[in-house]
Amino acid sequence: MNVIRSLCGAVPGIALGIVLMAPSATAQFGGPPAAHGPRPRTTPESIAAGKALFEGTCANCHGVDGSGANGPNIRDAGTRLGPEALYQTLHTGVLGSGMPSFASLGEEKLWQLVDYVSSFGQPTGAAASGDPQKGKAIYDTNACSSCHMIDGQGGSSGPDLSKVGTVRSAALLHKILLDPGGNLPTGDDLQERAQYPAYEMYRVVMKNGKELLGTRVNEDSFTMQLRDESGNIHSVQKFDVKEIVRVPDKSFMPTYKGKLTDEQLNDLVAYLASLGGAK
Amino acid sequence: MILARWLCAASLFYVLLLGFARESLSAFPQARQNGAKETHGSPADKLTPADIAQGKQIFAAQCAGCHGFDGSGQLGPNLHGVDARRGDAGIFSVIRNGTGAMPPVMSLNDQRVWQVVGFVRTLGETAPVEAAKGDPTKGKAVYEANGCATCHAINGQGGGVGPQLTIVGKMRPPKYFYEFLRDPGKNPPADTSLPERGGSSGYLLVHVVTKGGQDVTGIRVNEDTYTIVLRDVGGHFYSFDKTNLKTIEREPGKTVMPSYGNLSATDMDNLVAYLSSLKGGQ
Amino acid sequence: MRAAKYFVMVMTLCWALPSFAQVPYERLLHSDAEPENWLMYGGNYGSQRFSGLKEITPQNAANLRVAWVYQMRGGGVMESSPLIVDGIMYVTEPPSNVTALDARTGKPLWHYVPQVPRDFVPVGLFPTNRGVAILGDKLYLATIDDHLIALDAKSGVVRWNSLVADKADGYAITQAPLAINGKIVVGVGGGEAGAHGFLSCFDANDGKLLWQTYTVPRSASDPGADTWADGSWSNGGGTTWNTGSYDPDLNLIYWGTGNPVPDWNGEGRMGDNLFTCSLIALDADTGKMKWYFQFSPHETHDWDSSEPPILFNASIDGKPRKLVALANRNAFYYVLDRITGKFITGVPFAKQTWAKGLDANGRPIKLPAKLIEPSVEGTLVYPTLTGAINWTSPCYSPITGLFYVNARDGGAYYIKGERKFEKGNSNGVVGGGGGGSRPGPADETTTSIRALNATTGEKKWEYKMVGDSWTGTLVTAGGLVFSADAAGNFFALNADTGEPLWHLLLGSSVRSNPVSYSVDGKQYVVDSAGNSVFAFALP
């Protein structure tokens, strides 16, 4: 593809790209990488156009801010895949998943989507105004690592934070720290549960009186699996259960409202926002 | 001379392939994406000789263990002529998604799989085998006179007891036909309709007697440690639990197909020429 | 605030205890004491694959039914041997993914998918994974592209990631690693790509390399170099691609080694080619080789000795002995003293036409080269290239004293190819083989479950199957042997007599080893077929 790009100028390149790009019946199987012209320059206009396309076409599955709904969280897709792979994913879809090919949008619109998706994770506006170094000290003092892991160190009952800066905006991190129960993360690596938000809290009362409190890992008509505060899994057969009650707006993560000053919060957010960024 | 002949064959092959590609496109309209432009041929057509050489190496590393280094089959079936049977997209799909006993290949990216497809397409069209010396038109008459169509189908015309012969000319050299027509039971082909049974003799004749006295002889369709299914020449299936059988006699070397060793030399040459001419796309 | 936090912690501890506990080394050491769990690839350190569970017996086996099924999302064939630890099952999926399941219900809990490069083509190895190891609070996974990765066992998040070998040198790993005290041992594959075999040992906590022992000489002064003519030791081979065993009392690791390079053409490497096609015993602390026993000197049929070595104790001539048994790909069943490596006995357990027998030291008395060596036209020799047994595991019951092996009878035409080869390059995909084989007469290759007297190799009973099965065997204290035929009929046999008691067609070949575990007192037997894991239990 690089050869084609370097050989052709922009216009004949696009023309050639359109001809070569025409998907045959084999497109559903992947085929070789789709040919395309050189990537147009990214501008505020192209990002805005991409945003409009995204909210119309993609948000239904990936969430309005790309953090996932039916489909996975793609907020780090721009840094994780890079523009070329992102283009190919849009063009071809993802085999074996619910993501179809969007080749029919045409090359220009696909690049606009690439521009917009790549812009996720760039904190807009209230960028981390705090001091990440101080934020790290606050993270350590508050024993966040008893539940969270960063680069393999820490506990695993809460989400892994190694790349949290690429998938959550600073503003959202701020909100989560103040009200974790009201801002539960969605999306998970358990594709089978695509429609279940992760980290929803349930209280289960067994027929023998025992009570369990945990986040729902998986559930079906007959069984439920919960993860308790220590990260241990409990497997429950529904015919042993008296009642299952959803506990809304609750998280095992405590709120830091009133525990940290505004300045400390900003510092902590700045530290978290720096995690997973370009190395 | 040989080069010219090869080029001629290659271009004929490509023409036929394009014809097939178009047919396979129209057979699966739902495979097209919205707004897709119609194309002819496939991504495998755009491969370079270096790609095909790479495909050959990948084949040797990953595929030859089951299909043989020359693709003529071992545990897995003979791949000669498979492109006419399945088309490029079909081969790609089999590699990518697996089929029967063949697992999907997860470790190759799409470019690599197309390289393998490119190599697999070349199977069966390597060095020109000695051409059949008879007259295919007269051979067609021999075929019809001997009622071969009772058991064999060509292009959908004929019976389904034995293997289809539509592209048999791509899969087998003339030498094979001479040997086979004289003694069909000696080296029966694999039954590719059931890829799960790769490694089992195809068209094996089996004679069973049940505990209740039923006596059935038929072509083995499927067998495992506990069950066996036979098919008679009328196409009827018989399914047996082995615990209900008194005897099972496998009869290798025998087949429902008679020997044609008594054909005159001229008839044999012509028949072989006709079979060698069957390369699909008619 | 603090009081509340402590209150929550205490309350959590109170009811969290019954669930997942850590797996300290002591649990692995005494794995036989907890038959409800399956804590390592081979069941115990002796790789006996013996389950102490008794609920399912010859009397009730006919009532077995499917309890649950888990299907992989991607396509492919599972070859994984699961671990079951305190109600959680850990399986691996091709190429190198890990999935945690609720062992009671089969429901997935989490997946881990490493980023394996998609243009990597391992030579001679199928891109799959055969299982993980567990120690402490971590799982250990070896990936097809030669990484050893430690995962948090509760969540699947990566703790550390160490590189074992460079895939550009032809290495690929499919095996389950072996966890011993504070250490993880893992071998490598790639004998068809000219890789130089070795075993490596990593610190379980931080992934640092502790020792690495090569199985073929690396210089003319290394032990064994004089068994390779003309410096041909530089070709490589002796890969260690299947999980081995461990004796904690002797502190010895036992591992089988693979073929010398190039396969099928030994002309350029005359000599015994140590330490290929051997069983090696290494000191677990230092990696130094204590002894070796070579099964197939100057091997030319791709008969790797990478079969699991089964450690067991039994009486021989009235004296208690520490033994190791190995059913070799070359069709001989060997019993050795596992302290010294001394040969005790060896007999064929499947049809073979290449050796008159074994001499007093266990060395094969090969038939004339004309009859058994690969040739350009193809020489018919039994067993096949895939061997009288391949990677799947046999098992041993201390109750019956029998060794149960899924044995393959069949021959192949061995073809001698070019001697030249180039070191395997994953992107260039150049193989190291010097030939190959084509199958012998169709339908002749059959597999049978054979019960052998473990100390003598004498066959007690045999259960003949149709087709070429690639399933391992499991034996239980309840008195059953489990395996499957080529079509995917999973079955139970009476461990004493071989009588078939139950079977179910699973619809695809069972290319894996069955295991057994229990949750809440209920026994399950598990195996995978195609892309699915099936768990069986009594109603």
Image (cartoon, helix red, strand yellow):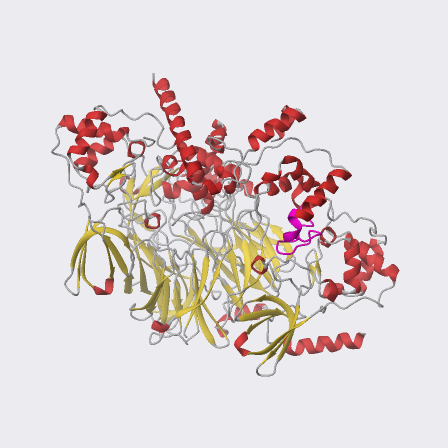
Q: What is the x, y in percent for residue B151?
A: 21, 42
Choose between A12 and B182: the one closer to the eye.
Answer: A12
Range covered by the magenta-colored residues: A57-77
**Quarter the C terminus of chain B occupies:** top left
Q: Quadrant of residue A185?
A: bottom right
Q: What is the x, y in percent for residue A211?
A: 63, 79
Answer with left or right where residue B253 lies relative to residue A10.
left
Q: Quadrant of residue A190?
A: bottom right
Choose between C251 and B217: the one closer to the eye.
Answer: B217
Choose between B53 and C284: the one closer to the eye.
Answer: B53
Residue for point 68% across, 44% down: A53
Q: Quadrant of residue C311?
A: bottom left
The reply to whether the magenta stretch includes residue B166 is no
Answer with left or right where residue C499 lies relative to residue C394.
left
The reply to whether the magenta stretch includes residue A70 is yes
Answer with left or right where residue A117 lies relative to residue B249.
right
Residue for point 74% across, 65% down: A182
Vertical side of A60 occupied by B155: above or below: above
**Quarter the N terminus of chain B occupies:** top left
Q: Is residue C420 visible?
A: no
Prevailing SS of the magenta stretch = loop
Give the total number of marks visible in the rendering: 0
Vertical side of B90 occupied by B135: above or below: above
Choose between A160 and C241: the one closer to the eye.
Answer: A160
Residue for point 57% across, 70% down: A224
Q: What is the x, y in percent for residue B216?
A: 17, 56
Vertical side of C513 occupied by C301: above or below: above
Q: Is residue C26 visible?
A: yes
